[in-house]
Image: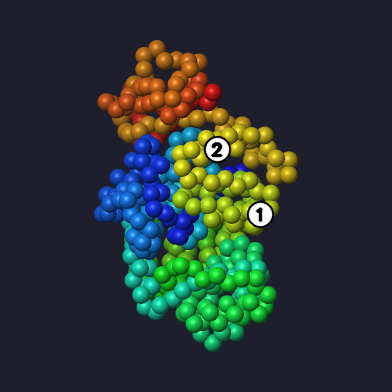
Amino acid sequence: MIAFMYSGQGSQQPGMGTPWSDHPSWELVAEASEAAGRDVAHLLLDADADELRSTRNAQLATFVTSMVILDAVARLGIDAAGHAGHSLGEYSALTAAGALDFSDAVALVVERGEAMQVAVEDPVGTMAAVLGLDDSGVEEACAEVDGPVWVANYNAPGQVVIAGAPDAVSIAGDAAKARGAKRVAGLEVSGAFHTPFMSPARDRLGEAIDRTELRAPDGVVVANVDGGIHSSPATWRALMNAQLCSPVRWSQTLQTLADEGFTTFVELGPGSVLTGLVKRTLKGAQRLTVNTPGDLDTLLDALAAPPDEDRGSPEGEHLFATDRMVVSPCAGLFTPVPGLEPGHQVDAGALLGHIGAEEVHSPFAGELMGWLAVETERVSSSKPIAWLRAT
């Protein structure tokens, strides 16, 4: 089974939207800009590293990038039965699973970024990665410090992040080394995320969460706070409220997905950090990353490949990976090109029909296997209208 993973803050990079600017999924950027009241395209195309480092910019830019990539993957007819995101990425996971509307999620991410931007100013905090020491050893190192320092991320076996006041983090790092940690590396972050230092942000964000409609997610979504699977909107509301001041239990999240039978993990977003954490946590799992449109073909090829005997079969999904869906770019009445029938070969860029006055072109070449919308049917945006088999 396939699980989609969504990048968190820190994965952003200048120009990360440029490869997608000509892709049909780029239309989400305009929607995000309207919902956010900000120029999201500028963040994805023109913002430099310093501008993107700001929490309020990094979170919005990373979330929208993940959503553009998710939309592009969905246009190929690839879906996942499971979702999980690291910190900010949890909002992407909930949106992908239908628990949040896209515009509502954008508004929440904006509020989250603004609230955290204010919270990092007082008290001043920092974070550090502890490498080569087990979870309990890091917890003990933090507990012996007479100062505010806590575990913030359980990222993978032997990779735990601590956070708190700079002096306390430094002392806890020394204590971790004394217990056998191979290395303690400071992180270039603006605050002590996922600790009690974020309490002001939690209170502000909680008000926005309480005003937002939440639905039961489709499929499996695993929570950062407890590494568990939840379906109740009320439970998710409480988890989202708790997330900012609670450690991200990412290694537990991955193990939960593995225990549920997920064998293929695909990171959708500007980074590949989560892909690396899967490698450290789940030996033998299939790992894939989609950062650019070029990665879409790699994803299709990987899912179409015969299953690895050691890894197991991805529940038959690979059998359908050469079949691709063309989806509607907008809402309206569908009219196919006259005479274009199943069995015809279609070139990449070929005109398939119209939605109202808007042309629908195939983004890839293949054999037309069938129409998924009938002539004069009213279709919604992103609804599949044609089924092709890649050649």
- Of residue 43 and residue 351, the one placed in the foreground of this image is 43
Mark 1 / mark 2, whichever is N-terminal: 1
Label 2 environment density (alpha carbons within 10 Å; few <14, some 14–19, many ≥20): some
- Please state, as top left, top right, bottom left or bottom right, where the C terminus lies in the image: top right
Q: Which of marks 1 and 2 is in front?
A: 2
Residues at discs 1 and 2 in contact (Cβ within 8 Å):
no
How far from the left and from the top, in percent, is residue 107?
33, 56
Q: Is mark 2 on a helix, strand or loop?
A: helix
- Please state, as top left, top right, bottom left or bottom right, where the N terminus lies in the image: top right
Residue at x-position 54% and y-position 87%: 146
Residue at x-position 46% and y-position 27%: 364
How far from the left and from the top, in percent, is residue 341?
45, 15
Disc number at residue 364? none
The furthest residue to the bottom: 146
Residue type for callout 2: Thr
Residue type for callout 1: Leu
Disc number at residue 282? 1
Note whether 109 is above or below 348 in the view shown. Answer: below
- Of residue 295 and residue 245, the one placed in the foreground of this image is 295
Q: Is residue 55 visible?
A: yes
Q: In this view, does 17 lie to the left or right of 367?
A: left
The furthest residue to the right: 309
Note whether 44 is above or below 55 in the view shown. Answer: above
Image quadrant assignment for residue 335: top left
Q: Is residue 358 left or right of residue 176?
A: left
Which residue does the numbered mark 2 point to in the structure image? 298
Q: Can residue 93 be seen in this view?
A: no
